[in-house]
Image (cartoon, helix red, strand yellow):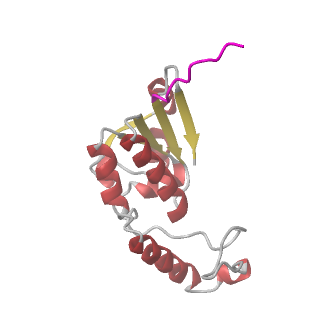
Amino acid sequence: METKEKKPLEKVCIICAKGNLEDVYASLVMANGAVMEGIETNVFFTFFGLDGITKKTMNNLHTATTGNPAMRMPGGLPFPTMLGGLPGVESAVSSMMRKQMGALDMPPVDEFLEMITAGGGTIYACKLAVDMFKLTKNDLFEEVKDIITIGEFYELCDGDRTQIIFT
């Protein structure tokens, strides 16, 4: 029986389409991990994911408290999703999440983006979503390399040993 040689991953292309705290951070953690492993990394922010690279919103992201069956309270108890709609609950939960992330030395979004680009990763914004939300390049964080179409993003994803990750 012949064994095939394992070939390492060469490129990841991550699509961030959701603007809540946990999904933006999932994209940033995966991108940073890839950069640290020496993997070519492209991150494409689209639709509500643009909140993760928009100057006004990027460091004030919220945690989804309604419709999230995986939401847990401190101690691991399930979070009653009906509470998520009460005034102030989303803000309090988001604040608690940011505090817990800070305790783990997770950087704020802007610092995470700087780490990714300093390591060689590239950040892109989706042209369709930017146009739809009437944003400009000036509204976006400085680490955003360009505003591109999905077709242009797919061109960046070309090559063997490339993975596209959708968060």
- 17 relative to 149 in the view: left or right: right
- Residue at the extreme top: 2
Inspect this view and state whether residue 63 appears. Answer: yes
Q: Which residues are magenta?
A: 1-10
Question: Viewer-proximal residue, 38 or 114?
Answer: 38
Identify the residue at image location x=66%, y=80%.
85
Q: How far across and how far down the image is residue 74, in percent?
A: 60, 82
User: What residue is drawn where x is 44% and y is 70%?
Assistant: 101
By secondary structure, the bulk of the magenta-drawn segment is best described as loop
Residue in the picture at 39% in, 54% down: 53
Instruction: List x then y, in percent, for residue 146.
Output: 34, 38
- Residue lying farthest to the front in this orientation: 1
* Frontmost residue, 44 versus 72: 72
Instruction: Specify whether residue 163 is painted magenta.
Output: no
Q: Position of residue 106 (x, y in %)?
A: 39, 64
Q: Is residue 114 found left or right of 37 in the rendered image?
A: left
Residue 138 drawn above or below residue 79: above
Which image quadrant is residue 80 in? bottom right
